[in-house]
Amino acid sequence: MSVETPGADSNPLSLENIRSALARLDETIIFGLIERVQFCRNNIIYRKDGLGKELGGESLVDFLLHETERAQAKVRRYTSPDEHPFFKDLPAPLLPPLKYDTPLHPNAVNINDRLRAIYEEEIIPFICRPGDDRQWGSSGVNDVLLLQALSKRIHYGKFVAESKYRSNAAVFASLIRTRDRAGLLAAVTDASMEAQVLDRVYHKTDTYGHEVGAAKGQAAVDAAKVRAIYERWIIPLNKEVQVCYLLERPLP
Amino acid sequence: MSVETPGADSNPLSLENIRSALARLDETIIFGLIERVQFCRNNIIYRKDGLGKELGGESLVDFLLHETERAQAKVRRYTSPDEHPFFKDLPAPLLPPLKYDTPLHPNAVNINDRLRAIYEEEIIPFICRPGDDRQWGSSGVNDVLLLQALSKRIHYGKFVAESKYRSNAAVFASLIRTRDRAGLLAAVTDASMEAQVLDRVYHKTDTYGHEVGAAKGQAAVDAAKVRAIYERWIIPLNKEVQVCYLLERPLP
């Protein structure tokens, strides 16, 4: 995040490096989901003023995410090309800027508003049991971690898209020139890679979930549900980022 | 954290509930360690002014931990009997106080200063490879999560100690009355339970580490090192909290 620069020896567009970064983010996401499902939905933490007017009209998750982003903005998290804030009114970095040697073209793609709506309205009701167990703080802190990991995972599509563009420039340039959204979506889709990702997250969730479940004497987290979250939301949002990025990408 | 109250049906001193909470915290700690070892030691993030005077004399980890605690204090994290801040100058909660139905006696036990020194000076050099990979932000954010989980794990000793006291009040009262630290330490020590914890963290780290390592095509995290961290630091600090708590505990 914030204070990183890519290592001199790493090529951020190599498919191996991209896959390794995505696999690592998937670990974080799976673990975050396993943590979150131990708590109920706790809808109150997503409601504006849900915990009281003292939070200035924000929900608890608004408040925790906003404060986290403010602090991390000060140490320049959001100057990194692979980080995207949820809030727009963040303070300037306290630390002097870093030069990033990024392969990405300048772009303003940020679909965190949609991600957040999907997370709160679809993913949480899908994985958490209904009700309120008053574990509001733990749920909210965990939501912040998950939202940040999901945002990074989804916006990593920019690197994927740039890599795909470079390996097939003529085709992509033509689709971009004609603003062919459907064609771009088809061109960035790799069904066999998606199947691999789905298998991998299923297997990992199953392994971790049994461990955690066994430790707690509780039911393991449902690996099929984690796979479904990837299939319905994470992979499509990642591809949406790819398409949006390509549509903003300058042509030669 | 902050905004929680124990469920009406839960007994916070039942050994089953305590063990379940500790096992869950161990998951978080193991996963945090697996995450942290992907980065180098990055000593610069622990040095005052390491990243520049702009952070007001704080190290990066100081800054991130301090800001995190400020935000969480506002939503009353540190009014919860199982939460302990690292900083003393935190803002008052914005939200109105909650009533906690805690079995603990009032006490001021907080060994986070020692925990932090051990974490930065012993644990990080022990598990992370030397050097600087410039992943300062990710390392620092991860350190905050780990320090918070370790603090909670260690201070959970208060609940363990209260439970032990109640199950053997005469013996403990006598040791407390004579300020017998060594006797208290012996009385709270359960060698077979410690062996179980060490086996469990070894097994879990081995399982998770292989998964993560396989995903990245990298060496798995060293399960023996995670077990050693529990043996050398986490379990002894937990027992230290137990002894300190008992020495503060009022006698009948």
Image: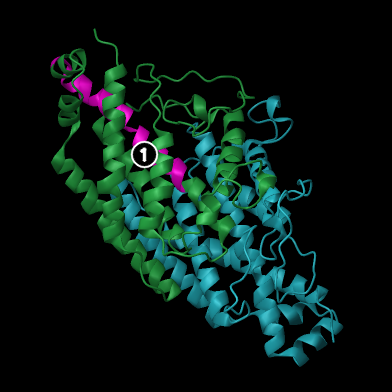
Chain colours: A green, B cyan
| Residue B106 in which image quadrant | bottom right
For mark 1, what is the residue? A153
Residue B210 on image: x %, y %? 33, 57
Q: Position of residue A7 (x, y in %)?
A: 41, 28
Residue depicted at x 66% and y 38%: B63
Q: Is residue A69 found left or right of A116 in the rendered image? A: right
Question: Please, is residue B32 above or below residue A166 in the view?
Answer: below
Q: Is residue A55 above or below residue B60?
A: below
> Measured from the top left, where is residue B163 in percent x and y?
66, 82
Most common secondary structure along the magenta stretch: helix
Q: Which of B239 and A87 is in front in this view?
A: A87
- Quadrant (top left, top right, bottom left, bottom right) of the C terminus of chain B: bottom right
Task: Specify the amino acid type for callout 1.
Answer: Arg
Magenta residues span A146-170
Residue at image location 48% in from the left, 65% down from the top? A131
Q: Position of residue B208 (x, y in %)?
A: 37, 59
Q: Which of A241 and A181 lies nearest the eye of the viewer?
A: A181
Q: What element carries label 1?
A: helix
